Image (tube, rainbow, N blue to C red):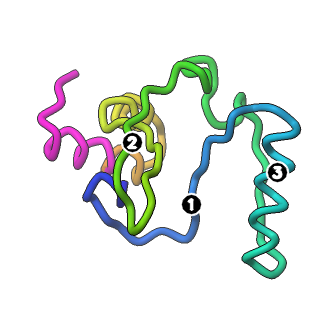
Amino acid sequence: MGVHGLARFTEDLDLFLAPSASNIECFKRALRSVVDDPAIDEMTADDLLGEAYAFADLAVDRVPFAELTVSVVSPRTLYEMKKDTIRLQDKADAQLLKQRFGLDN
């Protein structure tokens, strides 16, 4: 949400990693090299994406962030992922995305 210009307070960062064991282990090593004892909640693609989305199907945008260029889920995809969930925060996020980017159902 923040990279798309819709900052809100949150206590975590959701990342979608290409689902291979070597990729996930590489990420963990990199994270541990910069954060002492990071809290990592591992969830499978099924936990996060359900049946509606597969990692390979996520539409992403490449956007500047600080001194990097990062891949983020597109506003349309993020809206689609959040609009029909049961969490009130997701529904609020979906409405912000819809308004900011002129999205329709």
Report the amino acid beneath label 3: Cys
Which residue occupies the foreground of this view, 7 or 67? 67
Local crowd size for mark 1, using a 10 Å CA cut-off: few (<14), some (14–19), many (≥20): few
Labels 1 and 2: the sequence-earlier one: 1
Q: Nearer the viewer, mark 1 or mark 2?
A: 2
- Residue identifier under label 2: 62
Which residue is tagged 3?
26
Q: Residue at x 80, y 45 (%)?
A: 24
Answer with left or right where residue 49 lies relative to residue 62: right
Identify the residue at horizontal 60%, vertical 49% (top origin): 15
Residue at 87% over, 39% down? 22
- Quarter of the image for residue 66 reads bottom left
Q: Magenta residues, as a range?
A: 93-105
Q: CA distance from mark 3 to mark 2?
A: 21 Å
Position of the N terminus by quadrant: bottom left
Q: Secondary structure at mark 1?
A: loop
Where residue 98 sits in the image (x, y, percent)? 20, 38
Mark 3 touches mark 2? (CB < 8 Å): no
Query: Closest to the observer: 3 or 67?
Result: 67
Q: Is residue 97 in the magenta section?
A: yes
For the residues bearing labels 1 and 2, Cβ distance under 8 angstroms? no
Which residue is denoted by mark 1 in the rendering? 13
